[in-house]
Image (cartoon, grey):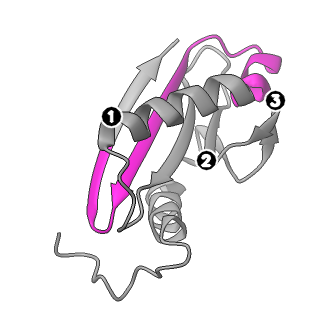
Amino acid sequence: MSTFSTFDITKKKPEKVYHAFVLGLLVGLQGRYEIKSNRESGLGRYDVMLIPKNPKDLGIVMEFKKIGDFETTDIETAFASVWKQIDNKRYAQELIDRGICRILYLAFVFKGKQVEIRHKES
């Protein structure tokens, strides 16, 4: 609540601010993970992926979803949309191709400065 100003978050592409913030936080993991952003995998392009250097470790797929100020979409609907997108686009394919079996999916849904994060694991 005290980090971002609403003026820091552009109205056109607010998810890019959160995306960049998360990437900055992940820098310290580069010794254990290969960190990729906006790359193709499966049938689409995920937002962030952490590929463990040890295939027995946990792989992570992150997806960001914005609810616009004037949208009637609620949080539950937005999360359902993220899970469907991750499954339908098969974002984990790159991890699967590398022999990574344990995969954590993180969905970030936000509206303005309000953010909720949920996870699933396979």
Residue drawn at (55%, 68%) of the image: 16
Residue drawn at (41%, 46%) of the image: 108
Position of residue 57 measured from the top left corner of the image (x, y, whole percent):
56, 20
Which dot, 3 or 1, sits closer to the camera?
1
Graded by Cα atoms within 10 Å as few (under 14), some (14 to 19) or many (20 or more), the crowding at tag 1 reads few
Q: Is residue 62 above or below residue 83?
A: below
**Viewer-proximal residue, 4 or 72?**
72
Answer with left or right where residue 69 lies relative to residue 23: left
Magenta run includes residue 68 = no
**Secondary structure type for disc 3:** loop
Which dot, 2 or 3, sits closer to the camera?
3
Residue labelled with disc 2: 48
Q: Give the residue type at disc 3.
A: Gly
Q: Residue furthest bottom?
A: 7
Residue drawn at (63%, 41%) of the image: 49
Residue labelled with disc 3: 42
**Secondary structure type for disc 1:** helix
Q: Give the residue type at disc 1.
A: Glu
**Secondary structure type for disc 2:** strand
Q: Is residue 14 above or below residue 101?
A: below
Residue drawn at (77%, 48%) of the image: 39
Residue labelled with disc 1: 76
Marks 3/1: CA distance? 25 Å
Answer with left or right where residue 10 lies relative to residue 85: left
Marks 2/3: CA distance? 14 Å
Q: Residue 95 lies in what quarter of the image?
A: top right
What is the magenta range? 91-116
Q: Residue furthest left?
A: 2
